Image (cartoon, rainbow, N blue to C red):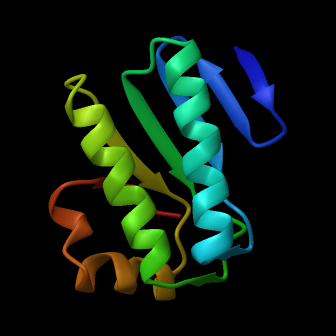
């Protein structure tokens, strides 16, 4: 296990990302930049987004996850979500993300 940064942990080819309390445009862009950097420096095949701390997410969060899904899709990788509360799960389902991203229960 390699701790790349405080909330970014690389284990083998899987990148584990602990998301912030609010996942909006600014924080989503920060997560995107950090994951891009880690992916350019390492062989990442899958990404797990941990929503345990996240209380708010807007459409920017959906866009960030979608862009990570596309980036990993080119590598034949996968994206998963864990620890999402009911509100976040509902947003993910309404957006259709549940069809392309594995969602684990809290």
Please give the name of the residue rendered at 34% of the width and 75% of the height, measured from the top-left corner: 92
Please give the name of the residue rendered at 47% of the width and 15% of the height, measured from the top-left corner: 13
92 left or right, relative to 47? left
Please give the name of the residue rendered at 36% of the width and 22% of the height, measured from the top-left corner: 45
* For residue 67, above or below residue 3: below
Quarter of image, res 64: bottom left
Please give the name of the residue rendered at 54% of the width and 13% of the height, measured from the top-left corner: 42
Residue 73 drawn at (x, y percent): 21, 35
Residue 96 drawn at (x, y percent): 19, 74
Which residue lies most toward the left here? 99
* For residue 24, above or below residue 38: below
The count of marks equals 0
Which residue is at the front of the view, 104 or 97? 97
Q: Is residue 28 visible?
A: yes
Residue 74 drawn at (x, y percent): 20, 29
Which residue lies most toward the right here? 6
* For residue 27, above or below residue 14: below
Quarter of image, res 57: bottom right
44 left or right, relative to 55? left
Residue 1 drawn at (x, y percent): 70, 14
1 left or right, relative to 66? right
Q: Is residue 51 visible?
A: no
Which residue is at the front of the view, 52 or 95? 95
């Amino acid at each position: 296990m390699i701790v790349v940064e405080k909330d970014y942990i690389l284990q083998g080819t899987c990148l584990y990302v602990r998301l912030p309390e609010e996942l909006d445009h600014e924080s989503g862009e920060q997560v995107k930049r950090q994951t891009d950097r880690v992916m350019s420096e390492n062989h990442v095949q899958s990404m797990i987004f941990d929503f345990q701390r996240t209380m708010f997410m807007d459409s920017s969060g959906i866009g960030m996850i979608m862009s990570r899904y596309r980036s990993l899709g080119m590598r034949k990788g996968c994206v998963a979500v864990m620890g999402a509360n009911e509100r976040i799960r509902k947003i993910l389902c309404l957006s259709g993300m549940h069809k392309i991203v594995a969602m684990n229960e809290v």
